[in-house]
Image (spheres, rainbow, N blue to C red):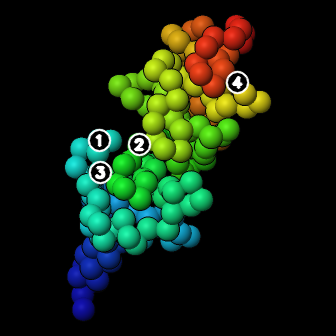
Amino acid sequence: MSRARRYRFGAVAALLPLLALSCLAHAGEACYRRDTGHPDVLPGCKQTAPGTLVISKAALAALQFDENGLAALQAGHQYYYVRRNGRHLPVITYDNGPDYFQEGLTRARVDGRIGYYDTQLQPAFAERFDWGFPFENGSAEVCNGCHEGPPDAGGHTGIVGGTHFRIDRQGAHLSTAR
């Protein structure tokens, strides 16, 4: 085999992992299990539009649900919590996975704003915010008019600007946070 042919084959072989990653990036409609230790594709589940899943009965039956009746999935860059009846909620990403439930509530971005949802995937209250931190000791810091700042060396972004205040579990304003 000539040196030129070996080089071309080597270049193609070097590109194969990149092509595979590219295909995975475009296969954002497939659902990946997050209910087990292995993010395997879940047959019978796909993301049809941002925030919307179609899940077959067979796919639901294959999931491992936790004590709250929830399983976690990922489709594209979006994480979801799913209930046994197929109800699902797209939640924000936290620590490279779906947002945790803190004091029985998780956060989801709906129409560009943060809302809080219970384990039934129902809104805890109507008000939504530009950002909201997890609940701790019965309250959470939220803000309006704020935005993500530049990432630090570790890739984490802070929330800057706006009006920060605390809310209780019913969404009532408690105090100014800053």
Q: Earlier in the sequence, mark 3 or mark 4?
A: 3
Residue matched to label 1: 50
Would you place residue 91 above or below residue 129 in this image?
below
Q: Earlier in the sequence, mark 2 or mark 4?
A: 2
Callout 4: SS: strand
Amino acid residing under circle 2: Pro
Amino acid residing under circle 3: Leu
Amino acid residing under circle 4: Ser
Residue matched to label 2: 90
Front disc: 1 or 2: 2
Between the C-alphas of marks 1 and 4, the distance is 30 Å
Residue 95 location in percent, x, y?
A: 61, 47
Between the C-alphas of marks 1 and 2, the distance is 9 Å
For residue 136, which numbered disc appears in the image? none
Position of the N terminus, as image quadrant, is bottom left
Residue matched to label 3: 53
Q: Earlier in the sequence, mark 1 or mark 2?
A: 1
Q: Note whether residue 55 is visible.
A: yes
Residue 101 quadrant: top right
Callout 1: SS: loop
